[in-house]
């Protein structure tokens, strides 16, 4: 029914204490959402300054060399650890997962709250490291520079160590919730694909994150006690650090993308009013990506590891591309002959398909050993990972935000402005990153503060300028988005329980959601994508 | 009070497992005193694996539990193995670099004069 | 019926059995993370041992097999008493449970005491990690041949140190259990925290079962 639920999880209790000590997964999800959006802005701020500096080939326009190094490190570290990794699982997953499963909360609500606090504490330690001057090693913290530079490496690595526990506890919570707390009637193959993606993600979280924890610990030990494990002068091996670091950080990118892909499955099905094509294959491909993702970390080290290892990792990397391909084709097949409507969430889904495809395909170039020698540490790599992380995960995340916004707040945002923002993001993103592919393939290195005295300096300056203008378009789009989203919280049109006509369980409960998710025991009468059998009433035309 | 349907392991099982563990510990110490070459480490790991299996299956109840718990722990050990294994395909092959001899890619290339094919061993 | 569900029952679960199974499963998921944490250190061990096989063999002679072996027996026994503690709670015998928990705590403490003596000897002999390696020439200190012997001790201290921290954490948890058991919080119907701490404690034992041969019994 098209109604705004008067007594809901937002206003059930209104004291600060009721929020700070909440055990309601929806409130915890919201608190995560605010925090990650804050860090996205901070990370984005560093990016804008970097792009400003790169407008001219000569260094020192607005940043000196060391500050530049600090800024790209902070941009990376904040975006990876404080924004993107918690974004879909901790924020959207917490808000929606239990509702999709027809249950009252996650398995361990207290642990969930602890996860949030650990994340906040870790992030504060990270902020502290920024305030005392930041880190200049790149977000990858490669030794031996990171074990010897006198920037705030200790506090930043400790921050990463702490935030990692937040990720681990969220992973544990989701695994147990999905295994043990599905409502009767929701079997494994009746779960929405978003849940499958969160499950695969949670498995990665518990298996991979401990390794970054021990890596950060070893780096801290190396810096404080010179244990010599990464120092060649002491019989150690700097490449060993790379192995340890990437054993986590490669699966981490699957932590980033898998939940996003789960959102896309939901969006494509709902906005084509069609059963998702190849449900079992999409679910299986999520698990396959999670598994294979652990076998390919060496592709970040093609230029530093031995040839035989590079060969093996290259082969494994090509295998890993296959499950992602399976997903893309299944989504396209879902769209085919669907009753497609182009509301904002669907716009984001379509944008995702294009941008993630480009990102994924450019990864194929990087996976070829001989080509990677040329492309490693150039802007080609930068563009590649921004296409998959931003063009992929962030776009999917925005799609999810717009899809579930009415469920979270009970009100709709302005569709017109949402479309404006989506289109601006599409243009701004491509304007920012396509020039980076081009100049990367021409040899423009990454992490360079100045690029004068190169053969192609003028050409690079042209591309850098395009890229910087693109970054401004993106900034504008996000500012517009912030405005219309915030405005809709109090002023948007009442959305009702099912503004999109979706068939997953969250659309069967009123908006905003009741404190215990459902007013009455949910009855599972159909699968999550049974558009061929069931017609769900849209509460908004 | 709720009926407790949880399986209680008998004292006998615990004691047998305990003494087996002690025996295995003695065995591993004794066999370490002899030199079997590279077999030593394999033997030590086999004994350690056997001991941990006993702890996992009986002290930690996995033999009687829902098998998913066992699957989790075996999975984690497989990942541990993958981590060590794949890392070692790099670290064990570092000396490969010394075995690579430079070879001319294109003998007709202009950078070479007629008599000299650029054969460099560093 | 709701009057059978008592204060330990959390209402987002359908019934206490689901809560018990979920809690245990959650603990196993946590143990997975512990295995992967130590995985990094075992990996470092494997690599440095492969690179320095003779040095490792020489260096391990600086470790005392008697102390290490005793510690192994101590931990295995503490695992037994921990398992017995759970058993006695399952059988509604609080007193025997508390005795076994206290014994577990005592054995854990013994482990740490022996460890302390081992570490003290290392400090005395200058067998320390990395830059602090400063071998003392003395009849009671083994001298180590081979390159980069400090690497062995970096690994030794990292692995036994991290393991030791887990022993201390375990002792804190067991003490908490003793207090709660004395207050009568546990019964055959509800003993989940005891079971979960037990699982953690057994993991601590498991890690040592591998650390002992790999560090003390090489060559």
Image: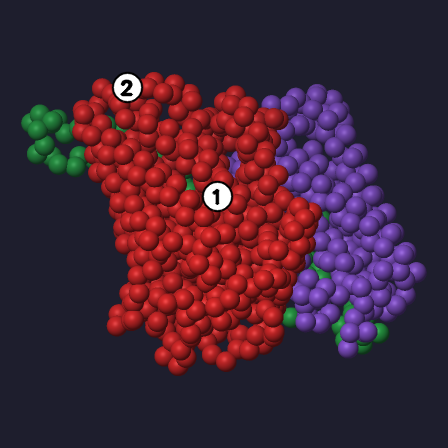
Chain colours: A red, B green, C purple
Mark identifier at residue A381: none
Work out whether residue A100 can be spotted: no
Q: Which residue lies furthest to the right in this view?
A: C95
Work out whether residue A362 can be spotted: yes
Q: Which residue is drawn at 87% across and 52% down?
A: C179
Identify the image quadrant of the N terminus of chain C.
Answer: bottom right
Residue B16 in the image: x percent, y percent?
A: 79, 65
Q: Is residue C199 left or right of residue A426?
A: right
Residue under label 1, please give it. A37
**Tag nearer the camera, 2 or 1:** 1
Q: Which residue is drawn at 59% across and 35% down?
A: A124
Above or below residue A79? Residue A508 is below
Q: In this view, does A501 lie to the left or right of A117?
A: left
Describe the element under mark 2 as helix, strand or loop.
loop
Do callouts 2 and 1 mark residues in contact (Cβ within 8 Å)?
A: no
Residue B98 in the image: x percent, y percent?
A: 35, 34
Residue A514 in the image: x percent, y percent?
A: 59, 64
Above or below residue C176? Residue A183 is below
**Alpha-carbon neighbours of circle 1 within 10 Å: few (<14), some, or many (≥20)?**
some
Mark 2, chain letter?
A
Q: Which residue is drawn at 29% across and 71% down?
A: A338
Q: In which quarter of the image is residue A479?
A: top left
Q: In which quarter of the image is residue B115?
A: top left
In this orientation, which residue lies closer to the viewer: A407 or A369? A407
Q: Is residue B6 left or right of residue A393?
A: right
Q: Which of marks 2 and 1 is nearer the N terminus?
A: 1
Looking at the image, how many numbered discs can be counted on the residues? 2
Residue C61 in the image: x percent, y percent?
A: 68, 35
Residue under label 2, please give it. A58
In this orientation, which residue lies closer to the viewer: A341 or C168? A341
Mark 1, chain letter?
A
Identify the image quadrant of the C terminus of chain C.
Answer: top right
């Amino acid at each position: 029914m098209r109604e705004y639920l008067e007594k809901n999880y937002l206003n059930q209790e209104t004291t600060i204490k009721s929020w700070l000590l909440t055990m309601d997964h929806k409130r915890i999800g919201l608190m995560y959402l605010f925090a990650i959006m804050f860090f996205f802005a901070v990370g984005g701020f560093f990016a804008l300054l970097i792009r400003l500096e790169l407008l001219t080939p000569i260094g020192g326009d607005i940043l000196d060399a060391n500050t530049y190094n600090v800024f790209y490190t902070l941009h990376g570290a904040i975006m990876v650890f404080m924004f993107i990794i918690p974004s879909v699982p901790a924020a959207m997953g917490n808000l929606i997962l239990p509702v999709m499963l027809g249950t009252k909360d996650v398995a361990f609500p207290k642990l969930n709250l602890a996860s949030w606090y650990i994340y906040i504490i870790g992030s504060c330690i990270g902020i502290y490291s920024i305030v005392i001057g930041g880190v200049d090693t790149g977000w990858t913290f490669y030794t031996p520079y990171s074990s010897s530079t006198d920037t705030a490496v200790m506090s930043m690595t400790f921050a990463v160590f702490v935030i990692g526990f937040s990720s681990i506890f969220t992973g544990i919570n989701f695994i147990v919730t999905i295994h043990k707390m599905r409502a009767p009637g929701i079997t494994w193959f009746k779960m929405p694909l978003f849940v499958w993606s969160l499950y695969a993600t949670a498995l990665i979280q518990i298996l991979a994150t401990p390794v970054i924890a021990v890596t950060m610990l070893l780096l801290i030990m190396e810096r404080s006690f010179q244990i010599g494990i990464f120092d060649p002068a002491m019989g150690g091996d700097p490449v060993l650090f790379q192995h340890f670091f990437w054993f986590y950080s490669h699966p981490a990118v699957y932590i980033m993308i898998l939940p996003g892909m789960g959102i896309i499955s939901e969006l494509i099905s709902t906005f084509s009013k069609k059963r998702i094509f190849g449900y079992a294959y999409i679910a299986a491909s999520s698990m396959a990506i999670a598994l294979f993702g652990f076998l390919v970390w060496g592709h970040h080290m093609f230029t530093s590891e031995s040839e035989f290892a590079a060969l093996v990792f290259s082969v494994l990397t090509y295998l890993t591309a296959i499950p992602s391909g399976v997903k893309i084709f299944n989504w396209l097949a879902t769209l085919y002959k669907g009753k497609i409507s182009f509301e904002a969430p669907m716009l984001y889904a379509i944008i995702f398909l294009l941008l993630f495809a480009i990102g994924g395909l450019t990864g194929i170039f990087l996976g070829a050993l001989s080509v990677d020698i040329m492309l490693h540490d150039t802007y080609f790599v930068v563009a590649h990972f921004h296409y998959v992380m931003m063009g992929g995960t962030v776009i999917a995340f925005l799609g999810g935000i717009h899809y579930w916004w009415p469920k979270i707040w009970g009100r709709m945002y302005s569709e017109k402005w949402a479309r404006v923002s989506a289109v601006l993001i599409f243009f701004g993103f491509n304007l920012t990153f396509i020039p980076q592919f081009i100049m990367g393939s021409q040899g423009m290195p990454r992490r360079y503060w100045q690029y004068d005295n190169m053969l192609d300096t003028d050409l690079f300056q042209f591309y850098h300028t395009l890229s910087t203008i693109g970054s401004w378009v993106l900034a504008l789009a996000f500012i517009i988005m912030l405005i219309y989203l915030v405005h809709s919280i109090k002023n948007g049109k009442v959305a009702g329980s099912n503004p999109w006509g979706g068939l997953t369980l969250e659309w069967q409960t009123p908006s905003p959601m009741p404190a215990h998710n459902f007013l009455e025991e949910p009855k599972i009468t159909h699968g999550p994508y049974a558009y061929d059998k069931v017609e769900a009433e849209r509460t908004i035309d | 009070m709720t009926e407790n349907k949880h399986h209680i392991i008998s004292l006998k099982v615990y004691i047998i497992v305990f003494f087996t563990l002690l025996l295995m510990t003695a065995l591993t110490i004794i066999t370490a005193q002899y030199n079997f070459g590279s077999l030593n480490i394999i033997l030590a790991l086999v004994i350690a694996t056997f001991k941990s299996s006993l702890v996992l299956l009986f002290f930690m109840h996995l033999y009687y539990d829902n098998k998913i718990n066992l699957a989790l722990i075996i999975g984690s050990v497989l990942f541990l193995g993958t981590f060590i294994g794949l890392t070692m395909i790099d670290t064990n092959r570092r000396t490969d670099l010394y075995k690579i001899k430079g070879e001319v890619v294109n003998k007709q290339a202009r950078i070479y004069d007629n008599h000299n094919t650029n054969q460099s061993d560093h | 019926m709701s009057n059978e569900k008592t204060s330990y029952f959390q209402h987002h679960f359908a019934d206490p059995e689901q809560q018990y199974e979920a809690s245990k499963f959650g603990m196993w998921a946590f143990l997975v993370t512990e295995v992967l944490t130590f995985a990094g250190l075992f990996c470092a061990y494997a690599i440095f041992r492969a690179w320095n096989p003779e040095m490792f063999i020489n260096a391990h002679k600086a470790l005392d097999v008697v102390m290490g072996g005793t510690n192994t027996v101590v931990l295995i026994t503490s695992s037994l008493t921990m398992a017995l503690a759970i058993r006695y709670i399952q059988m509604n015998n609080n007193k025997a449970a508390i005795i076994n928990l206290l014994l577990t705590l005592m054995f854990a403490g013994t482990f740490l005491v022996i460890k302390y003596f081992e570490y003290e000897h290392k400090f005395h002999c200058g067998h320390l990690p990395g830059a602090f390696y400063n071998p003392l020439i003395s009849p009671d200190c083994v001298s180590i041949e081979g390159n980069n012997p400090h690497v062995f001790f970096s690994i030794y201290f990292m692995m036994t140190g991290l393991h030791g921290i887990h022993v201390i954490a375990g002792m804190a948890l067991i003490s908490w259990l003793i207090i709660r058991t004395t207050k009568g919080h546990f019964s055959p119907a509800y003993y989940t925290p005891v079971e979960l701490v037990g699982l953690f404690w057994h993991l601590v034992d498991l890690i040592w079962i591998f650390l002992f041969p790999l560090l003390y019994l090489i060559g």
